Structure formats: C-alpha cells, structure tokens
Image: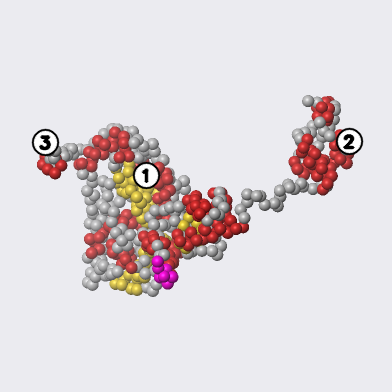
Amino acid sequence: MSQSSKASEVPDEIICHQDEPFIDEITSLNDLYFGNHTEFVPLSSSEDEEEDSETTDISVGKFKLNSIAASLDKDGLKPRIHGNTGKTPKHALSLTDVQRISQFLKEYTLKNGLPLPGRQPNYSTCGDKVLLLLPSDKTKSDIWELYNQAATMLNYRQVSLSEFKKVWLEQTPHILIMKPATDLCPKCQRYVHNISNAGNLSEEEKKTMLDEYMCHLDKAKQQREYYRERCLLSKELFQTHDLNQTERGQVCTMDMTQMYSFDFAQQIHYPHHAQEVGPLFFKTPRKCQAFGVCAEGAGEQVFYLVDEAEEVGKGANTVVILLHHFFEYWGYGEKDAVLQMDNCAGQNKNNTMIRYGMWRIMTGRHRSIEFSLMEAGHTKFSPDWHFCLWKMKWRHSTAETLDEVAESVRHSSSNGHNIPQLINDAEKPVSFYDWTSFFEAFFKKLPSISKFHHFRMSEESPGVVFVKAYRSSAEKPINISKKGQQLPNVDTLPSVITPKGLDAARQWYLYDEIRPFCRDTSDSLQSCPKPVCPKPRVKIDPEKRKCPKQFASPEM
C-alpha cells in the first residue's frame, strides 16, 4: 500500500498540522514512549522518498494516534496516565476481608503453631518478631480450604488461593510452615507434641512447659556456638601456620590447636549402578561402612571405607582404631587437639574413647585433648556435609569394586576435600587393635559419663579428666587412673584383631545372586568372587514342614 493511500486514512486535522513545530512535538513524544532509536516520519505521497529514507517507521493505529493527539492538545508534552490508575478494582479485597484472613491465621497458629526462639537452620529471621512454625502435615492450600469453609459458614466472602497467600505474606510473614525433616531431636518432638496438646492445662503449666522447651534449645544453641568458634579458630591457625605445606602424620611437632570431627555414615552397597535393574533392588549386595574424620582447619575429610569382610564391628573399639590410624598418617602434628564427636554412647561417648585420649596424653602424642559434644538430637556438623557431597555423587555413580567406590569419594569434591582411605592400602594400611581390653588394666570407668558434654585432659594432670556438663558449667576433675598401674612403653600397642571375613553362605550368595547383575561376570570379580569353600547345604527338618493339626484339611 502506498504512502498516499495511508495518508487518506488519517484525519484531515492531523495532516494539516504537519508543519515543523508539530513534527518536533510528535518526535519528542515518540522518544518519550518508544525511545530515541526511532524518528517520526511525516506522511508523504512519494514512494521514492520512502525508499531513500533510512529511518524506521512505527505502525500506529487510528485510535492510538487520535488519543495521543488529544492528550497532546489537552495536557501538553508529558507521560500519559491510565484512567484506572489509583482506583481500587471492584474485585479487590476490602480492609475487612484482609483483617479476617489475618485474624484466622493468628488463631490457627495459636492452636497449632510453636514459637521458634533464636535463629535455626533453614529459617530466615523476620525482624524482631518471634517466628511461629506450623506443622508440616498441612500446606498453605489446606489452610486456605479451612478458611473458605469457615467463611462459608459465617457468610463471609471467600478468597482465591493467590490472594490468600498474598495476604499471608503481607500481614503475617512471621508465621511459617515447618519443613519436613528426619533425624529430629526426640526431646523437641516430645515438647512439640505436649505443647500442641496442652489445651486443658492452665496458663502456668503451659508456661512451665514452654520454658523447659526453650531451655533445651538454649543449651543446644550454646553447644553449637562453641563448635563454630572452635572451627573458626582452627581455620585461622591453619592459614597462619600454612599447614598445607606440612607433612602429615607427624606427632606433636606444631605448637598450635587443631579441631577434628568424626562420625559414621549410613553404609552403602556395591556393586552399585546409576541405572539399576529392578531385581537387584530386592537383593543384598556387598556392604561397605563409611567412617569420616574431618580436619576442620583444612576443610578436608578422610573417608575410611570398610568392606564387610574387613569389619570388626561398629562400636567404640572400631572408632578408636580408625581415629588412631588418622593421627598416625593424616594428622597435622598439633600439640593441642579438640575432638568433636556425635553424642552416641555406643560409638563415641564412652569410656574407651576417653581412655584413648588419656593414653595419647600420657604417651606424649598430644599435650592436651578436649572431647566436645553437642546436645543430643542437634548434632549436625561438618562430617555430615562431606557425606552429603559423596552421596550426591554416589547416586550417579557405577561401582562394582571397592576401588571404584573409593574413586567416587575422590571425585565427589572438585577441590579434593574428600579423601578415600582403604583398609588394605599399600602405603597406609589400617591395623585392628583391641583397645578396649588394653585400657581395662590401666584406667577406671568415668562415673556419670552421659551427663557431661566436655572432657578435657592435659599433660599437666596425667590421669585426671576435667568434665563439665555444658560450656558455661564449672569444671570438675575426676581421676581415672588405677593405683599402682603404669602404662607400658610408648611404642607398646594392644593385641591385633583379625577380621572374621565372610562365611560360606554369604560368599555363595554374592556369587550366585549378585554377580549375574554385574558388568564383569567373571569368577575373579573382586566384590563377588567364586568361593573356594564348598557350598553349604540347607537342611530342612521334615517335621517342621508338616501342616499343624489345627490347619489340616478334614480329608487328612
């Protein structure tokens, strides 16, 4: 269509004003609305001028152009304002509706929510307001449905889900829904249950229960802060002494303090495939335990991978065995050590562990050692973070041998923070000693060990353990040395324990049931080799196979 035909569609009052001042005003208006990258082009009947022009035309409809012209004549050159600006839409919520939603949320939280004193992980603070947490079994959609049901009964206006969430965020941002979680503190869960079902209790009883709950959380926070402070101090000293250049495995050579934390991870099974076949899910592949010792200053963790044929249990003796190996081959030679451990009595918080620390002090392997524990149920720390890194890599890994499991650990951290350690390593082999029996001859049991969270020992007071319940508690000395008993030579170690290995039934199970699902189905596969022992026969007592009389058919 030519320019002349376009011009015929434009009103005459617009065309007649196409002089220079008018064109300048339209150009300024065009820059205001569309930016200064275009230029207003006067209407022309010449097609040659259209071809020679290097400017860009903007397609504007008749109604739009009339509106711009009218606004320009009436208000001059300034931004146009929509007619509905500042007006409340007819469907908008009234102030009364907003207040009803807010009041409903507050009353619902009063019945079902719990206060969250202090800042907890995964929850951001909301100014000076105390965060109130609702149970995770109901979502915002469920609570919205409850509100609409109540609104229907009271002849109030119902609201949409989006508006309900918007009012929730604007009016009551301190009310949150708990995140689903596992491995929770049993004390906290008991307090939560009792407080949420305290409708028939008096206000004084409710306050007492809530004070006990907050006291428990304050103790957990106190121990957590102590752990973080010691971690920061270890990192500063690590950088100050430039321990990255230090040969590891030295004993008591650096006049400084380092912190180590350790824990077990959930055992894994291998052979493991990223694309696993269905039948293998119902089998029991070869087991592998994982024990991690984290150097908090360096941010590195050594993973001890213990095959089920090499394990000697998962108790206190095994923890001491692996911890002793770590100090002999992976320690930084610090004179003072802080050991952070899980609050598990069967593995860490026991007499064997405390005696091992005293043995290291009395044999000159450390100048001082402190065992620190967090409140039970609130024990997430650095080893769990390293384990999570590995488990994320493990989901997408294929490993049929223990060496391939170790490779998955090594590749789980791009900066080399996860280091695998095999039991039968050629350069750093792990020896199993009977530490529990060895210490019985030299040390007494520490009374009421479960009440304390800090255990300190130093060369200045050999045989004496300084204990305290919490960080702010007073220390109490307890002598655990037996009278008349002296430790043997520094180089004397306990007797060696030989792992039992796999029995014949387990070996044949791996060979018959697991090996067919492996890529390498040869008899020499490390995880499922062909057993050299004869296959055991399963004896079935024919008497036990008989059907009991009460279930026998009438014909029998």
User: From the viewer's perspective, is 443 left or right of 376?
Assistant: left
- Circle 1: element type: helix
User: From the viewer's perspective, is 96 left or right of 240?
Assistant: right
Q: Amino acid at mark 1?
A: Ala
Stretch in magenta: 200-206
Badge 1: residue crowd in 10 Å (few <14, some 14–19, many ≥20)? many
Q: Amino acid at mark 3?
A: Glu
Q: Earlier in the sequence, mark 2 or mark 1?
A: 2
| Residue drawn at x 40%, y 42% as measured from the top left | 395
Q: Which residue is mark 2?
A: 16
Q: Which residue is mark 3?
A: 555
Residue 200, x across and y down, in percent = 40, 66
Q: Which residue is mark 1?
A: 406
Badge 2: residue crowd in 10 Å (few <14, some 14–19, many ≥20)? few
- Circle 3: element type: loop
Residue 427, x across and y down, in percent = 33, 48
Q: From mark 2 to mark 3, how far is it between C-alphas?
A: 115 Å
